[in-house]
Amino acid sequence: MSTHGNVITSYKDAPTRTVTAGGVTYAYRELGPKGGVPVVFFVHLAANLDNWDPRIIDPLARQHHVVTFDNRGVGASSGRVPDSVEAMADDAYTFVTALGFDEIDVFAFSLGGFVAQDLVMKHPALVRKLVLTGTGPKGGKGIDKVVGVTYRDILRATATRADPKEFLFFNRDADGKAAGRAFIQRLAERTTDRDEPVSVPTLRTQLKAIKKWGLSSPDNLATITQPTLIANGDNDRMVPSVLSEDLHRRIPDSELIIYPGSGHGGIFQFHDEFATAAAEFLAR
């Protein structure tokens, strides 16, 4: 087991814990040194605790208290999954405050990035820094198309017995295919205490929430004063890459990293570079 003193620094070894608040029992994992501002990870569509890339979590957990969680109705967390991003943000707030945190850094990917934006708009004092990856703004052009892309790629993956994420997150060229396979292998490194799979009804409800978010009127992102790091691949088919540029333009003093020759999972394809950039940004 990779521990440093008695601090767990490897995500595959982080035990699953629960906290109950507002009638919901939230499943979560934590690792890294306690003290300082915790980094709370907001996960993507149809994902549970096991969907985080250990090559991004582990380097950050060397210096930071890292927390991942299943929001309401997802994985091992109880309750029904909400059909709006705004309700997901309310649940995330309930979870974070139940752990006693009054200030957090947020690391968000994809749907998690929508939830994070809503959270920071409603509770600006809670969030110190924001990392938004593979995501886009409320009302962002093309977000409502995610539903069709997702179903198509799930069918393509089923036909080839692949994981849908290999299609959804990575380009279908040699580099992308290799990166996709490597990513899926890394997600399997944890062999015990795996999370509950995400159900099809949960996926459908989350897709409904994503569609609503895409069709909603935009937020005024100029009010986000937190230091913000935005990252994506240059060929994101799920949440179009131009939306990362849109976020960058609209969030004052934000930083943008676009990884070449990669898709929605660009941060996973370039995990070494990205983990270094994220650690540097959070430490600043």
Image (cartoon, rainbow, N blue to C red):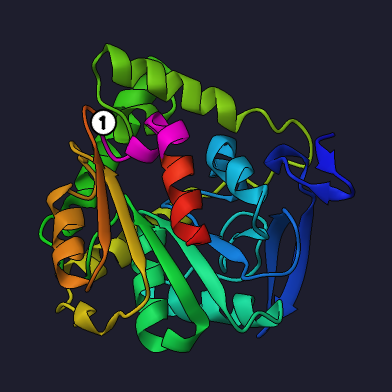
Residue with the mark numbered 1: 262
- Mark 1: secondary structure: loop
* Magenta-drawn segment: 263-273
**Vertical placement of residue 14 versus 268, above or below:** below
Between 163 and 137, the one nearer to me in the picture: 137
Residue 97 sits above or below residue 230 on the image: below
Q: Which residue is drawn at 74% across and 77% down?
A: 20
Residue at the farthest top position:
174
Residue depicted at 22% across the width and 67% down the height: 137
Three-letter amino acid code at the position of disc 1: Ser
**Residue farthest toward the front in the current orientation of the protein:** 284
Q: Which residue is drawn at 41% across and 35% down?
A: 273
- The location of residue 112, given as percent across then percent down, is 42, 60
- The reply, left or right, for residue 233 in relation to residue 63 is left
* The image quarter in which residue 26 lies: bottom right
Magenta stretch: helix, strand or loop mostly: helix
Q: Determine if residue 265 is in view.
A: no
Disc 1 residue crowd, few under 14, some 14–19, many 20+, Cα 10 Å: many
> Residue 269: within the magenta?
yes
Query: Image check: 73 left or right of 46?
Result: right
